[in-house]
Structures are given as structure tokens and as C-alpha cells.
Amino acid sequence: LAWARRTHRWGKEMPHIPTLGKAISNCDVLQAAQSMVLITFLVQDHIYWLLKVGILKFTNYTPIQWHRRNLRFITLSHVLNFSLCVREVMQLKSKIQEAVAKGDEDAVKKAKAGIYDNKRMMVRYVLTFIQMLHVSQVKQLDDRYIGFMGMISSYIDASKQWTPTPVLVQPTPSVALPSEKAAGA
């Protein structure tokens, strides 16, 4: 399945190019760096696939060496994503202060939800950072811990897909027993 995923990953860097352009035009160095690192990872992932299927051949790198080298870019991407979340949390905290001053409870709730989501993602980025250190063999760790971290980060990813549905309390019609019907009639 991993190879099928890589086969169909072509063009995944395209949505990040406008983000990079916008970040550069806004002088947002952190976002620009994150976009550049992610684009670099995705392009090098194409090269890894081409090496693996034998279309390209490098004398200095085997396909697995290239892949491990490339994983260092995604590791850096997790650090930059963590930093972007920290920045967003700081901005949301200032929005909470402004909303409290205005008495806007909806804005406070929305900002608190944003802070919660960003903190969850910060945990995910720490976990995936450690996983990438292990997979890229920068630091060898126990596979059990890495697997457990993978389960937690996957749960965080999957839980974003679950939309909370409001529980509607439906009034239940009162059902009269046959004896009550006869008494009431």
C-alpha cells in the first residue's frame, strides 16, 4: 500500500506553492520556510519513487539512503509546523483578551477551540518528529514506543475527521396502556 500511495502522490506539492507565494509576499518567514521544506520533501519523495522503481540511478545513494535523507526534511517540517501552532496559539490568546473586553462569548469560545486544536496538533508534531528521527535512523529508539506514538498521532489525525453531532432530545410520545385507554374512555 505504501508504494501505491507514493505512486499517486504526484502533484501533492502543487497546493503548497500558492501558500509559499503568499507567505513570501507577506514576509512570513516561518510559513515560507515550512512550505519550502514541505515542497522539497514531496519533490524528493518523487525522486525516491523513481529510484525505487529503477527509472533513476544515483551512484552516491541507494533508494533507502535517499529516503532516509529525505525524511530529515519532513522532520524539519514538523518542527516548523509546531512553531506555526505556537504562533497561532499566541494570536488566539490575544483574540480572547479582545473578545472578553468586548463581551463576545462566541469569539471567546471559538478562540478557545482554536487553541485546543492547535495544542493537539503540537502534541502530534512532537510525536511525529520523534517517529521520523527513528525511521530516518538519526536516533534509534525502541519500536514499541514508536508504534505507540504512531497510534496516538493517528488517533489525533483520525479524530479531526469525526464531526461532533449534536444530540437532539426528541420528546417521546406517551403510550397509553390498554387499561389506561379503557379508564379514560
Image (spheres, grey):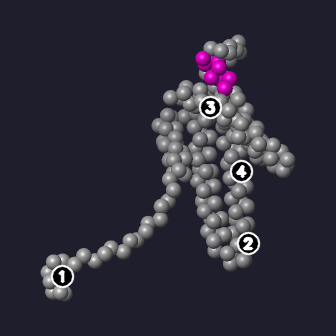
Residue at 75% of width from left, 44% of height from top?
19
* Magenta highlight on residue 71: no
Q: Residues within 10 Å of mark 2 (few under 14, many from 20)?
A: some
Q: Amino acid at mark 4?
A: Leu
Which of these two is toward me, 184 or 61?
A: 184
Q: Amino acid at mark 1?
A: Lys
Q: Is residue 65 left or right of residue 161?
A: right
Q: Residues within 10 Å of mark 1 (few under 14, many from 20)?
A: few
Sequence-wise, the earlier of marks 3 and 1 is: 3
**Magenta residues (range):** 46-53
Residue at 65% of width from left, 30% of height from top?
10
Figure check: 58 above or below 157: above
* Magenta highlight on residue 50: yes
Q: Amino acid at mark 2?
A: Glu
Q: Amino acid at mark 3?
A: Arg
Disc 4 vs disc 1: which is toward the camera? 1
Q: Which mark is residue 181?
A: 1
Sequence-wise, the earlier of marks 4 and 3 is: 3
Q: Which mark is residue 84?
A: 4
Disc 4 vs disc 3: which is toward the camera? 3
Residue at 72% of width from left, 40% of height from top?
16
Which of these two is toward me, 136 or 11?
A: 11
Q: Marks 1 and 2, Cα distance to the nearest angstrom? A: 61 Å
Q: Magenta stretch: dominant SS? A: helix
Q: Residues within 10 Å of mark 3 (few under 14, many from 20)?
A: some
Local SS, label 3? loop
Q: Marks 4 and 1, Cα distance to the nearest angstrom? A: 67 Å
Sequence-wise, the earlier of marks 4 and 1 is: 4
Indicate the position of residue 172 as horizontal and vertical percent values: 33, 73
Indicate the position of residue 175 as horizontal and vertical percent values: 24, 76
**Residue at the disc numbered 2:** 98
